[in-house]
């Protein structure tokens, strides 16, 4: 990852914005919460298993992993993100229930051993995602488990965002936001599965998340109403149609 991505996440952690993304009181939190919930549904018995949270941020996964008696390791290249976890879970860290590693995955110690890798909002920030996936495959034991989330390039929302590119550029010039979101790679299910299969992963399970009919800019102007509608539609037949969902999660095994 480059410095632009690092600076973005350091700022998000420092300002408390990232942790607030998982707060139910935040009208913009629903996409992150439903992604987390559907990821947890892909985990079976993780008691005593070693779970590595890739790009762990402020540790949204931690309480769920500890409740299920899993051994949690969080990896992030943002020191401020990890500082947030240290302040929130000092007891669990001192009891070795939580391990934190400050590292870019490119430089991650391959001698480490884990049963499950989970990466939410992670793989889309890499210029060479296949290289990262190959590294994760190498570290996992046979039967090891990888769960990654992907932003959906075939979604209605992304289509509208592309169509409104000029409009968005004008708005940014007018309002001049303090910092911009770093670039990220959008994915189709076909491309994601192709890379995972090429590397050697099998036994795929795929879950769509965040049914989104009220697309940009409505989601920005009316986030509470947009989330209300999304919640009503999340578990309907619309969730099976890629065009209406903003992301998908793939579970695969080595």
Image (tube, grey):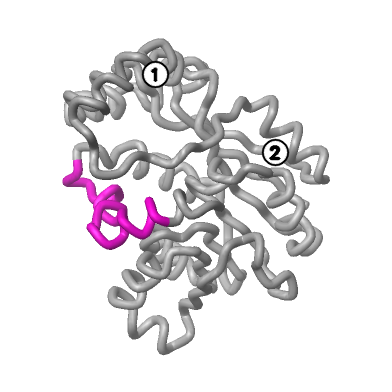
In this rendering, does residue 212 appear at all?
Answer: yes
Farthest residue, direction top: 163
Circle 1 — which element? Answer: helix
Q: CA distance from mark 1 to mark 2?
A: 30 Å
Write the residue at 48% across / 50% down.
40
Give the extent of the magenta segment: 7-26
- Percent position of residue 88, x then y: 29, 74
Q: Is residue 244 above or below residue 38?
A: above
Question: Mark 1 or mark 2: which comes first in sequence?
Answer: 1
Residue placed under numbered mark 1 in the picture: 161
Left or right: 118 in relation to 59: right
Bin the neighbour count of mark 1 within 10 Å (Cα to Cα): few under 14, some 14-19, many 20 and up: some
Q: Main secondary structure of the magenta part?
A: helix
Residue placed under numbered mark 2 in the picture: 204
Q: Is residue 41 magenta?
A: no
Q: Is residue 105 above or below residue 201?
A: below
Left or right: 90 in relation to 177: right
């Amino acid at each position: 990852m480059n410095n632009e991505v690092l600076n973005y996440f350091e700022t998000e952690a420092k300002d408390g914005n990232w942790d607030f993304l998982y707060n139910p009181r935040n009208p913009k939190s629903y996409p992150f919460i439903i992604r987390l919930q559907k990821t947890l549904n892909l985990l079976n018995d993780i008691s005593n298993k070693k779970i590595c949270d890739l790009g762990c941020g402020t540790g949204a996964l931690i309480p769920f992993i500890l409740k299920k008696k899993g051994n949690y390791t969080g990896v992030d290249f943002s020191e401020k993100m990890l500082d947030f976890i240290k302040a929130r879970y000092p007891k669990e860290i001192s009891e070795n229930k939580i391990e934190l590693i400050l590292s870019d995955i490119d430089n991650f110690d391959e001698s480490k051993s884990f049963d499950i890798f989970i990466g939410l909002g992670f793989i889309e920030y890499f210029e060479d995602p296949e290289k990262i996936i190959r590294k994760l495959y190498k570290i996992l034991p046979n039967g090891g488990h990888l769960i990654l989330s992907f932003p959906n390039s075939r979604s209605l929302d992304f289509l509208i965002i592309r169509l409104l590119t000029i409009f968005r550029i004008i708005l940014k010039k007018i309002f001049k936001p303090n910092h911009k979101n770093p670039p990220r790679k959008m994915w189709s299910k076909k491309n994601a599965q192709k890379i995972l299969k090429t590397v050697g992963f099998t036994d795929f399970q795929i879950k769509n998340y965040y049914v989104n009919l009220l697309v940009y800019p409505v989601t920005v102007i009316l986030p509470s109403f947009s989330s209300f509608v999304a919640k009503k539609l999340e578990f309907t037949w619309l969730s099976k149609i890629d065009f209406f969902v903003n992301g998908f999660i793939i579970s695969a095994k080595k």
